[in-house]
């Protein structure tokens, strides 16, 4: 744990006055603010000053990476602008990652997905009625391109075109589908997809501030498979990450959703490689994402499950924390959903680990915890 001295300042005439933490809106608990507040580490302070004068080859700066912590109340408060950010600004990002993931990237070894068959443990019989839906998603970005928050309009269109070509090349009948560009999407179609909880919209102040929504709606869209007999396969293009790849279905069949998800992820990756591209990946970090919370596998596997013994989300959170389980509890309408007074006991349960373990371990952790909660 770092020693913090928040009352001390860094910055001044050399252009680093934005590092004056007394001006930041985020509270002292914000992870990147805590990292910047490590004033007793003289060597690290010197690193920050040096980093303030550096840019990635896509022009991304340290100031840009922390703009959300400066201007908004944040928990993590830092975003990468490209895959280079994790190297150029490593002294800062490495500490943020260790604080959030409890993993030191200097010793971590991540492995690319091998797309081999994986058998997921089955949920208990009671899960067939208690579990309402299952969803698995991951984030992927192309190596060498800026991330969505740091792109030009031309780059957004170029990346979208790459993925449109990939989607048109799908051969598996369960993956074939339609890509809907935001730019030409009718209001009726948009409303339909939003109501079905398939489509993202530009309503997040944090993503707005850091540049994710710049040039909206250029370069944005959604791919959806046509045959949804085994589940819905979706790829978002141009949201927080260049792509969010996901599969979902009603019910508790985690294996079926996993099979569709992993098959789709492999098909997208093969398509990327066919165009002489690859996903942004570092052996020390795993797959790279705009937000450092999603590096590693980038995977979030979740179920919506009815747990009537827990009357509020906070009750369930306390129980899970006491057990030491590496799972996250949310309301079914997002992280900030308040369930304290509405009597609704369906919760979103997901894995918290992304870094330091593989997809199988992470999804098994979620399934094992849900099994224990149901029993």
Image (cartoon, grey):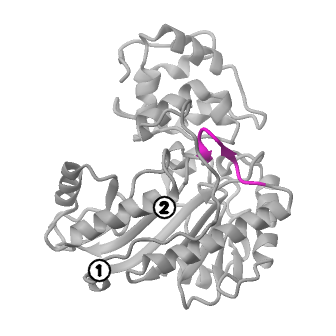
The alpha-carbon separation of the residues under discs 1 and 2 comes to 20 Å
Q: How many marks?
A: 2
> Which one is earlier in the sequence, the residue at label 1 or at label 2?
1
Residue lying at 80% horizontally and 60% vertically, measured from the top left? 273
Horizontal and vertical percent position of residue 342? 19, 71
**Residue 287 inside the magenta-drawn segment:** yes
- Describe residue 45's horizontal placement relative to residue 101 as left or right: right
Q: Quadrant location of the C terminus?
A: bottom left
Q: Main secondary structure of the magenta part?
A: loop
State the residue in front, 17 or 30.
30
Residue corresponding to mark 1: 127
Q: Look at the image and give the residue range highlighted in magenta.
A: 278-288
Residue 68 against residue 299 in the figure, above or below? above
Q: Secondary structure at mark 2?
A: helix
Q: Quadrant location of the N terminus?
A: top left
Horizontal and vertical percent position of residue 60? 69, 35
Residue lying at 42% horizontally and 33% vertically, measured from the top left? 99
- Describe residue 223's horizontal placement relative to residue 278 as left or right: left
Q: Quadrant of residue 73?
A: top left
Is residue 81 visible in the rendered image? The answer is yes
Q: Residues within 10 Å of mark 1 (few under 14, many from 20)?
A: some
Q: Residues within 10 Å of mark 2 (few under 14, many from 20)?
A: few
Residue lying at 43% horizontally and 28% vertically, measured from the top left? 33
Horizontal and vertical percent position of residue 270? 76, 66
Horizontal and vertical percent position of residue 161? 81, 66
Residue corresponding to mark 2: 360
């Amino acid at each position: 744990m770092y020693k913090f001295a928040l009352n001390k300042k860094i910055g001044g005439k050399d252009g680093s006055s934005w590092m004056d933490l007394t001006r930041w809106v985020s509270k002292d608990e914000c992870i990147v603010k805590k990292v910047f507040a490590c004033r007793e580490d003289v060597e690290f302070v010197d690193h920050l000053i040096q980093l303030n004068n550096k840019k990635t080859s896509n022009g991304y700066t340290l100031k840009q990476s922390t703009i959300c912590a400066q201007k908004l109340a944040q928990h993590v408060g830092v975003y990468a602008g490209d895959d280079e950010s994790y190297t150029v600004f490593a002294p800062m990002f490495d500490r943020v990652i260790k604080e959030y993931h409890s993993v030191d990237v200097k010793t971590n070894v991540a492995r690319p997905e091998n797309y081999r068959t994986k058998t997921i443990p089955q949920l208990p019989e009671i899960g067939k009625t208690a579990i309402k839906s299952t969803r698995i998603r991951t984030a992927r970005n192309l190596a060498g391109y800026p991330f969505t928050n740091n792109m030009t309009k031309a780059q957004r269109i170029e990346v979208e075109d790459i993925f449109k070509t990939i989607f048109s090349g799908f051969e598996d009948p369960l993956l074939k589908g339609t890509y809907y560009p935001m730019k030409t999407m009718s209001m009726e179609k948009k409303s339909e997809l939003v109501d079905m909880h398939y489509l993202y919209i530009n309503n997040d102040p944090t993503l707005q501030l850091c540049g994710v929504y710049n040039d909206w709606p250029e370069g944005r869209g959604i791919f959806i498979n046509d045959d949804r007999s085994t589940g819905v396969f979706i790829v978002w293009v141009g949201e927080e990450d260049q792509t969010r790849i996901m599969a979902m279905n009603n019910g508790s069949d985690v294996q079926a959703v996993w099979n569709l998800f992993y098959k789709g992820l492999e098909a997208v990756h093969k398509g990327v490689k066919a165009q002489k591209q690859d996903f942004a990946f570092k052996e020390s970090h795993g797959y790279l994402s705009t937000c450092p919370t999603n590096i590693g596998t980038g995977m979030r596997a979740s179920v919506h499950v009815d747990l009537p013994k827990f009357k509020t989300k906070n009750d369930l959170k306390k129980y899970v924390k006491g057990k030491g389980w590496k799972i996250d509890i949310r309301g079914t309408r997002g992280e900030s959903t308040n369930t304290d007074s509405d009597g609704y006991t369906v919760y979103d349960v997901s894995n918290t680990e992304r870094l330091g373990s593989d997809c199988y371990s992470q999804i098994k952790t979620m399934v094992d915890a849900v099994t224990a909660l149901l029993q």
